[in-house]
Amino acid sequence: MGKHLVLVGGGHAHLTVLTHLGCYVGRGHRVTLISPCGYHYYSGMGPGMLSGCYEPRQVRFNIRRMVQERGGQFIETSVTAVDPAAQKLYLDNDAPVSYDITSFNVGSVVPTAELGATDEHIFAVKPVINLCKARNLILRQTSKGITRVVVAGGGPAGVEIAANAWKLLNENGTTPAVTLVAGNHLLRGVPARAKHLAVASLAARGITVLEGTRVHSFENRCAALTDGRSIPFDFAFVAVGVRPPALFRESGIAVGQDGGMLVNGYLQSTAHPQLFGGGDCITVEGPTVAKVGVHAVRQNPILKHNLQVALDGGEKKRFVQTPNYMLIMNMGDNKGIMWRQGLVLNGGLAFLLKDFIDRRFMKKFQVSGELDDFSGP
C-alpha cells in the first residue's frame, strides 16, 4: 500500500522533488505540499525584482500548479507544530495532516519583531515576496522630492537591497537618500577587494554606509541606532541575518545551535528518521557553513533521491557540505561583484554571469506557465 509523503514548504531544495512527483505518485504514494503561498520566489533575483530589473513572473515558481498538475495535493496554510511520535503536522487553519515521511523546506526568518518593525513601510528581506510588495508600495506612495530609505544589515543582502532600492527610486522620478546601517563591519568575511569595490559602488551613488553601529529599534518612522543616532525614513528594509523558524525547537525536535532541524548527511533528522529537510531551515551535522541559497540548490537531487528511498527502500545518498561556493552581488547598475575564494570579478561581466546562472535555474524549474502569468503576488 502506498505511503503519504508531505512536503512542508516549496523552497529551493524541494524543486526537484516537485517537478518529479511522478517518481512518487506513479508508485502509488500520495504527495501533499503545504505552503502559505501558491508561489515561491527565488531569492537570488529578489533584489533585481525590487529595482525592476526582473518582473515578478520571472522570479517565481507556481508551486501550487506544479504539484496539482503532477497528481499531488496543495494545502495553502502554515504548519504550526509537529508531533513526530504521532507523525502528525498541525496546521494554522485546517485539520492535522498525518504523514509517513515528511520533508521541510520552510526557509528562514528575519528577526523583525525584536526591532519593533511593525510599520507597513518596513520590510524584511525574507520571504522574498516582501520585496515585490515593497516595490508596489514605494511606486504607489513615492512622489517628487527626496525619498529616504534605511537598510539594516551589512551583509551581501543588505548591500544588494541598498543598491537596488536606490535604482528603483532614481528611475521613478524621486531623489534617493539611502542609508545602509552595516553593524560592526560591512561585508564581514568577504574578500577585502570585494568589500572595497562595494563601498566604491555605493559611494558613487551617494549611498551612505554606517559601520560600527546597528539598528536597535524602529519607531515612528525612525531607525534608532545603538550609537544614539536616529535616522528618519520613508521606507526601511531589514536584512540583519536570518535564522530558522521556531517550529522545530517548539515541537521538541533536535536542533542545531542556530535552531535549524539537526540532520545527518542524508538530510534526515538525527532524532526522527521520518523527517527530512533542506535549505535554511536545517542544520547539517559537522562544520558550520553560511546560510546561502547555493546549499539548497545542491541539496535538490540528494533530497529527491533520499525521499524516494525512504518510501520504497534502497540506499540513500550523502550530501557533502562544502564552504567553497561563488557569490555574486547585483549592484543595481547592471554591474556585479563576484568572489570565490581568492578570485574577485567586478563589472558588467560579473552581472551577466549572475543573470545567466539565475535565468538558467529558473528555466529548469519554471514548468507551470509562470512566464504567462502577469498576476500580482
Image (tube, rainbow, N blue to C red):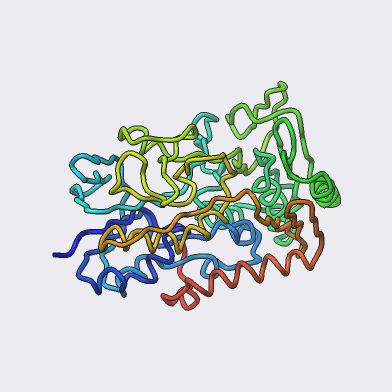
Q: Is residue 27 above or below residue 210?
A: below
Q: Position of residue 7 (x, y in %)?
A: 32, 56
Specify the farthest residue to the top: 228
Q: Position of residue 169 (x, y in %)?
A: 70, 55
In the figure, 25 relative to 201: above or below?
below
Where's residue 76, x and y in %? Answer: 31, 56
Closer to the camera in the image, 77 or 28 = 28
Quadrant of the image containing the N terminus = bottom left
> What residue is drawn where x is 25% and y is 70%?
25
Left-right relation of 221 to 93: right
The residue positioned 72% from the left and 38% from the top of the image is 188
Along the horizontal axis of the image, is 79 left or right of 208? left
The answer to whether residue 181 is left or right of residue 122 is right
Query: Which is nearer the eye, 30 or 374?
Result: 30
Q: How many marks?
A: 0
Q: Is residue 174 above or below residue 308?
A: above
The residue drawn where x is 63% and y is 68% is 357
